[in-house]
Amino acid sequence: MPVSPRAPACAKRRFYLRWPFLLAVLAILGMGVAMAMHWDDRALLWVKEGLLSKAERKQSVWLPGYSVDIDAKHLPGMADDEASDVSFNPVTRTLFAVMGKNPFLVELSLDGDVLRQIALVGWSNPEGVAVLDDGQIAIVDEREHDLTLVKVDASTSSLNRSDFPRYDLGESADQNKGFESIAWDPAHQRLVIGEERPPRLYTWASDGRSPLVGDKQPLPNDQLDLRNLSALAVDRRTGHLLALSADSNLLLELDENGRQVSFMTLLGAFNGLQSRIPRAEGVTMDDEGNLYIVSEPALFYRFKKHVNPGQR
């Protein structure tokens, strides 16, 4: 049977009629992927970064200038222990990481080698750790909603929670996503404490040696654009705060006024990473400006500054 000359024209019309529908589907899919990968968070941050002057960048940590030099190193024998946080000790020039599932502290070299393990007896779910002065370490237990100040020296092999002073952090908006991050800010003589979801910041007065003074106080911040707050660190050189979010795959730098300064995305191909950091749970910075991240289950990352502060 001969083909009607109208057939090609009809087919073309049907194609053009379907084209807006296909564009709409692609747009919806694109928005879904963008939200899943948190590109919506990053777009705003990129705009804010671009507004900073070169002088402001030089005075900041400037996370775009970092590149990974130890990528996803496995902590031996700890795959079932869930690395929850890490903190730098400037006296020993080592790192202390807390493992949350089977509670213990692990002391690491700056290359991520295990030096010793310290059992944590009586803790339920330790999620945050901060090294203070004079051998004092603060440990936040998310399940118990409290903070414990312990003393660690070269001979310490275990710690019993009942032997040390504990401080009640109070109830959280979401009891399953409570207080889990902590950092010591020596310049302001305070601990900075973070609530996971919704992300909120608090401070508690501390000179790093003595018992805590008073009670925790809210730290106003309207620029904590993160889906959750996994960990905190303070850069002693600039006084800026680093806020880590596993859900957003982001590390965010805030200045002393809580203003967003720079960020690092934790996906593969960014900042030299081979692949996405699976579940970034802890962050710290040493006295030379090197950056350390630990991820569940037990992965270790180190980043070093590698480019001019004005570059991304």
Image (cartoon, grey):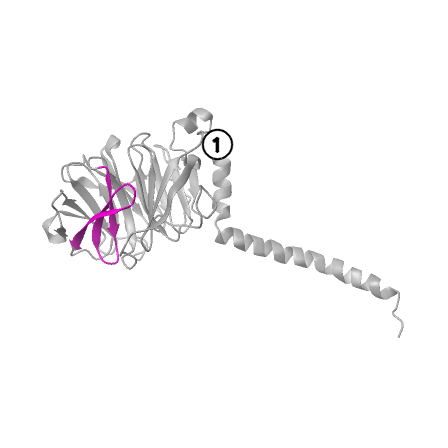
Q: For this rendering, which residue is in front, 120 or 189?
A: 120
Q: Is residue 265 left or right of residue 152?
A: right
- Our reading of the magenta stretch's main secondary structure is strand
Res 114 visible: yes
Q: Name the residue: 43% across, 45% down.
A: 273
Q: For this rendering, which residue is in front, 189 or 122?
A: 122
Q: Which residues are magenta?
A: 93-120
Residue 127 spot, x, y in % from top left: 26, 51
Q: Is residue 26 left or right of residue 88?
A: right
Secondary element at tag 1 = loop
Would you say residue 103 sits in the magenta stretch?
yes
| Rendered-image quadrant of the N terminus | bottom right
Res 261 visible: no
Height in image: 101 above or below 94? below
Would you say residue 56 sits in the magenta stretch?
no
Q: For this rendering, which residue is in front, 62 or 192?
A: 62
Q: Residue furthest bottom?
A: 1
Q: Name the residue: 19% across, 43% down.
A: 137
Q: For this rendering, which residue is in front, 261 or 286?
A: 286
Identify the residue under disc 1: 311
Q: Name the residue: 10% across, 50% down.
A: 163
Residue 150 spot, x, y in % from top left: 15, 45
Height in image: 253 above or below 141? above
Res 304 → quadrant: top left
Residue 249 spot, x, y in % from top left: 42, 48
